Image (cartoon, grey):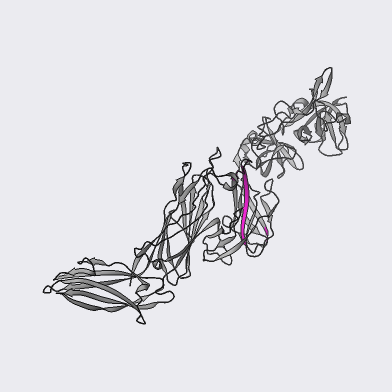
Amino acid sequence: MMKTAARCVLALLVGVLFSASAVWSAESGICAKVRVRLSQDVALTRAAFKATLEITNAPENVALENVKVTLDIRNEAGEDATNLFGIRPPELTGISNVDGQGRIPPGTTVQAVWIIIPTRDAAPDVPTRYTVGGTLSYTQEGEQINMPLFPAPILVKPDPLLCLDYFWVRYVYADDARTPEIEPSEPFPLGLIVRNDGKGIAYNMRITSSQPQIVENEKGLAITFQIISSQVNDQEVSPSLTVNLGDIQPAGTAVARWYMTSTLAGTFSEYSATFEHIDELGDKRLSLIDEVRIHELNHCVRIDVPEDDKKPDFLVNDIPDEDHLPDRVYNSNGTNSDVVAVTNAMIHGGLGFGSLSVQLVATCPAGWVYIEAEDPGQELYNLVRVVRDDGREILVGDNAWTTHRTTCPEGQGCIRVHKVHIFDYDSTGVYTLYYEPKASPSSYSLDEVKGLRDGEWVELGCTEGLVVTAVFPEAFYVERPDRTVGIRVSKKGSVVPGMQVAITGQVATTPWLERYISATSVQVCSNELVTIEPVGVTTRSLGGGSFMYDLLTGAGQRATQAYQWVKQGSEFARSEVPVDVPGLNNIGLLVRTWGKVVWSDPSTSTFYLDNSGGFDDFRFPDPAKNQPPGVRVVMPSWGMPVPPVGSTVAVTGISTCYTEGGYVFRKLRVRSEADVQVIGQ
């Protein structure tokens, strides 16, 4: 008995219709059709037998003519079993053939070697004994001679019988030809489970794959694929499409997973697979590969209950549906189970502004479930931990992951869709999701911070020289010593006016559209207090125009607004809608202004200053209601005395704003009663 390499070719046609740049082809149409072929060879070592016949014709003899050798294989009952074996044509030395046309001259020795390969039927369950014999016939000087070959015993052990399950993703994410940006390529997996359903060992199994090849491309798009990593069972191996799976025991499995990238986004569809045995004998019973199947892969997961073998498992969509939701999971041990998709999960809570966790709640059945919900982290936060309410940790990356996709519904333009996904067993339906900022805080100047979009993490160090100018119960304000820019900061720690601080936190916008920093840490830079004098401004100049404002992202500080008196003939009338206040934006700065009190409400410690410059602010658009014109001034707390109507006052406070009817109006927030001084009646 010997070992020989019986080589099979697995001709695998996968993803036969790769729709480049059409990630959501069902919604947006296909902009290119590309046919892709992936070919793989499966090579493994299996048992075979070598039968050698050597014939010597003595020098004094005459030539042996019409040499013929017939092999005969019989089972233990003496029955002909030749049909249970594949017999390769012999390798001949010193003779042209042994099929009745051969000739052995005097004084020569010839040899014939046969490779005998048992089929799977020769020993389907247990080792089985056979004998290999036969007949040698030839003519010598016209006389026919037949000689029996002494039968040699052989023991045939059961063969392996391999079933291959391939796992291909449906969508490949990379650069989208429909958008002007260059989107990065996301690695996509190709998975394989090899299951040995036979009673013999599959020795030294190796998978050799060729790169996917473009065999049809309607629009001539340049598409290439690149292998970036490979894994066999629980071990990372060199990035290659050729992997050695080793020996696969009966009822055992081996798992391989590759990660690849594509240069264009697209869709794999129309999966199909074929395989053939290329042994020249053409007997399919000699093939050790019994079946090849391909599945639409949703995600590579890891089954970790009741135990974790650290090997990849595969969550797939076997039953076609419009949303391509997973319905089955294939275990690396060769088993598979139903999966129920739950898509009505709810997220409770929000991220940012001091919170980095939310709760996910879903109604789940027993068994394996796939849960899908809107991702609150979007593209500003990374999911770092998921904990079920009974304490079970869900493996992030394998069994909990997020996706951020561009979809282009027909006639609606392209939008980003953010999802969080959980794969779990016997779910309780309640999870806490923990996030962290995608990037470390970046250092910015204070004026740059106001121009950032909400959610950006920033770090304003001591070198920025920020000084606290006002402290309120829920927030404080800082500005640069040159008094060019200031900003509100959510309350964090204990600070006092004049203190120099460094701040780390997120940029955000209040409901009244004032930009601020939601601080996670405030560091005192110096024990020395710095006095910041307020900037003197007229009431007309309070608020100011927009500062780095972006209508699409909401970044930057919006302009403040005021109603304008417009001359109509000999009369003046108020404008229908407020207009933007011109000038430099001073929201967040400590300022000092002067004006006449034109209206007051002692019950709310609020009063209004006139503008003396052509603008009048009204709380409501109906002037007949005698609403107060001017700039709103708010004392630190209700019940504090306010100056009488008609008095002229000097007011120091923080320039801020409030909103009504969708407009942004000016407001001064006073730090203390001493900040309001009556200077005339």
State the image coordinates of residue 519 (x, y, percent, origin top left).
68, 43
Q: Residue at x 57, y 61 (%)?
A: 329
Left or right, residue 430 beside residue 263: right
Residue 149, magenta (yes or no): no
| Residue 171 appears in the rendering | yes
Identify which residue is drawn at 84% across, 19% down: 571
Examine the structure image and report whether residue 419 is included in the region drawn in magenta. Answer: yes
The answer to which image quadrant residue 359 occupies is bottom right
Quadrant in which residue 656 is drawn: top right
Q: Which residue is outermost to the bottom?
A: 77
Q: Nearer the viewer, residue 186 or 195?
A: 195
- Furthest residue in direction top, as rendered: 570
Instruction: Magenta stretch: give its range.
Output: 406-430
Residue 392 or 532: which is nearer the viewer? 392
Q: Is residue 54 above or below residue 444?
A: below
Q: Is residue 434 above or below residue 366?
A: above
Tell me where residue 421 appears, x and y as whole percent.
Answer: 62, 54
- Quarter of the image containing the C terminus? top right
Mark count: 0
Looking at the figure, which quarter contains the N terminus? bottom left
Asked if residue 538 can be seen in this view, the reply is no
- Residue 239: x %, y % from top left: 44, 53
Q: Residue 379: horizontal and vertical position, in percent?
A: 61, 45
**Relative to 599, is 423 on the left or the right?**
left
In the image, farthest residue toward the left: 60
Q: Is residue 90 left or right of residue 347?
A: left
